[in-house]
Image (tube, rainbow, N blue to C red):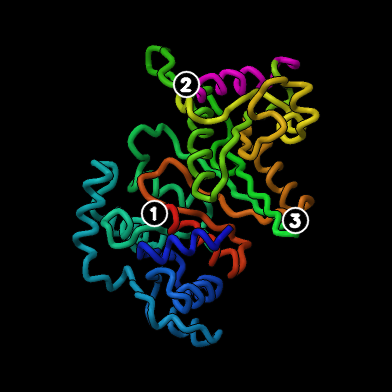
Amino acid sequence: MFDKLIDNLKTARKTIVFTEGSDARILSAADRLLKEDLMDVILVGNEAEVKAAAEKDGFCVCGAKILDPATYEGMDAMVEKMVELRKGKMSAEDCRANLMKGNYFGTMLVKMGLADALLGGATYSTADTVRPALQLIKTKPGAHLVSSCFILNRDFGEDKLKTICMGDCAINIDYQDDVDKEGNVTFTAAQKLAEVAVECAKCAKIFNIDPKVAFLSFSTKGSGKGGTVALSNEATKVAKELAPDLAIDGEMQFDAAVAPEVGQLKFPGSPVAGNANTFIFPLIEAGNIGYKIAQRLGGYDAYGPILLGLNAPINDLSRGCNADEVYKMAIITVALA
């Protein structure tokens, strides 16, 4: 799966910023990325501490740029830009204080065009990675929300690889209608879930998946009632309108989505049933549990969460990640730039 991404990186040089520059896992991944000459690297942190941490564990990051918010020469300009972006919600003093933190500083490097992508979360929570992105990078034109997906890959041997996409498993707890002060619905829950599906399909294509999108539920084609059945059913209709070129169907149960004999029995004639590879969950509980089952019992390697809907690639690591996961997530993140 990574061969194609790496080939693409070599044709268009990009820069990634790591918000936790002195973390051993980050340093290990940076060492590897630099040795393979895949991208330019910025490490955020105190220069002496970053170099000492790298030397302690035998990593070479001499090719990386180390930027310390406390001594950064362009801080005044960065503060001024952040004040402008926050539009009265933060004072200059508040902005300067936040920019002393790696997550805000790194995000502003991306916003100001000094880096193409950001990877954080080795020590920061997901919220601490996503919040600066929402405040400073913001959603891309046409996007109403930030969501996420996981790319899962399994080698079945004999050159048989299976790559699938699952979303949203990390960001949106559930989907509710947006309502204005007069009580009018301005953006429906189904529109939100449909947008997640279309963004997941776009991301899937980057990983050479020809997306066949299944909106999941505990019901197939109206066989059940209640819960999220109506949401998944309505979101399917909206998504088909948003992306008529995509193979999309739902609502359907997981067995109908993946098993041809079940799918065509329960949902005859569907272009997706039995052949789905991009799975859209109606609640975060289902999505998070689902991808972890695939990972832990199904033998899939899981990469993500990959954040969708932002103006630039900002991705989050698990605080339990290892160096290899950082390396691979860095490749994925820069591939999105």
Which amino acid type corresponds to the residue marked 3 in the rendered image?
Phe
Question: Left or right of 207: which side holds 47?
Answer: left
State the image quarter where residue 247 is shown. top right
Earlier-in-chain disc, 3 versus 2:
3
Rendered image: mark on residue 156: 3
- The answer to whether 54 appears left or right of 92 in the picture is right
Q: Identify the magenta region.
A: 222-240
Asked whether residue 269 is drawn in magenta, I would say: no
Magenta region, main secondary structure: helix
Q: Which of marks 1 and 3 is nearer the N terminus?
A: 3
Residue 197, horizontal then vertical, whole percent: 53, 33
Q: Which residue is drawn at 59% across and 54% down?
A: 303
Residue 81: % across, % down: 22, 52
* C-alpha gap between disc 1 and disc 3: 30 Å
Circles 1 and 3: CB atoms closer than 8 Å? no
Residue 121 image label: none
Q: Could you classify mark 1 by the number of other residues whose Cα lies within 10 Å: few (under 14), some (14-19), or many (20 or more)?
A: some
Q: Which mark is residue 337?
A: 1
Question: In the rendered structure, are the residues bearing label 3 and label 2 in contact, judged by CB atoms less than 8 Å apart?
Answer: no
The image quadrant where one finds the C terminus is bottom left
Q: Which secondary structure lies at badge 3?
A: loop
Find residue 201 and report its horizontal and vertical position in percent.
52, 38
Around disc 2, counting alpha carbons within 10 Å, would you say few (fewer than 14), some (14 to 19), or many (20 or more)? few
Residue 32 higher or lower than 164, as above or below: below
Q: Is residue 44 visible?
A: no
Q: Label 2 belongs to which residue?
A: 241
Q: What element carries label 1?
A: loop
